[in-house]
Image (cartoon, rainbow, N blue to C red):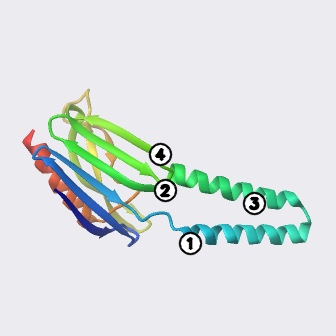
Amino acid sequence: MAEKEEFTDISGKTIKLSCQNYSPFCREFTISSAKLSLGRVMAFTCTVWLLAYTAFYLTQNTAVLSGAIFVTLSGMLLHIHFVKVDHETLLVVGSLGVQLSAAYASGRESTTFIEMSRIKDIVINEAIHMQTVIYYLCILLKDPAEPDGVSSVVPLFQSSKPRLNCLVRVYRSCQEIIGQT
């Protein structure tokens, strides 16, 4: 049974949280961001090309036009392949571990798996960014040299940046699963 709820990110944009319960020991959380706006892409492209045509008119140098077209197209391709994330997924399997996935606008996916034996805890942390306190969900990894220490922190949902009310929902569900192991 999948539950879907709407929340907002730290910028106030709408994001969707989908919770899928596979068993009492296995849950999947997917946060979906808004799709790439064709209007914004067109506005950006038109602005860059108008500036390039203005520079071409003033200089009569065709390299300006070629450069503007190349930079715009390259920038868009790099943006959809490396930056624009359509959705991020957190799969928590109680006895096994946690899988983190991100699906990019180009169709590329990246996946990371962390074994449960390496996880110390999943917590909500806070940070100060531009005079604003923001909250983020993260996984604390055990330090192999010191059992009570933390070796590193793995932030979750880095691209979608959900607000605290969404993070609390995911956090409580994760703690239910981790508490059962």
Residues tagged 1 and 4 counted as in contact (Cβ below 8 A): no
Q: Amino acid at mark 4?
A: Arg
153 is higher (above) or lower (below) than 19: above
Which of the pair 36/12 is nearer the observer?
Answer: 36
Q: Amino acid at mark 2?
A: Lys
Cα distance, mark 2 to mark 4? 10 Å
Left or right side of 150 for 178: left
Q: Which residue was labeled with disc 4? A: 108
- Indicate the quadrant containing the N terminus: top left, top right, bottom left or bottom right: bottom left
Q: Which residue was labeled with disc 2? A: 84
Cα distance, mark 1 to mark 4? 23 Å
> Disc 2 on helix, strand or loop?
loop
Left or right side of 100 for 77: right
> Disc 1 on helix, strand or loop?
helix
Cα distance, mark 3 to mark 2? 22 Å
- Label 2: how many Cα within 10 Å (few below 14, some 14–19, many 20+): many
Task: Between label 2 and label 4, give the one nearer the viewer.
Answer: 4
Residue occupying image coordinates x 82% and y 72%: 54
Looking at the image, tell me whether mark 3 or mark 1 is earlier in sequence order.
1
The total number of labels drawn is: 4
Q: Indicate which disc residue 68 carries.
A: 3
Residue occupying image coordinates x 19% and y 34%: 96
Q: Which residue was labeled with disc 1? A: 39
Task: Between label 3 and label 1, give the one nearer the viewer.
Answer: 1
Looking at the image, tell me whether mark 1 or mark 4 is earlier in sequence order.
1
| Picture coordinates of residue 147, whole percent (x, y) | 19, 31
Residue reaching furthest to the right = 60
Cα distance, mark 3 to mark 4? 26 Å
- Label 4: how many Cα within 10 Å (few below 14, some 14–19, many 20+): few
Q: Amino acid at mark 3?
A: Ala
Looking at the image, tell me whether mark 2 or mark 4 is earlier in sequence order.
2
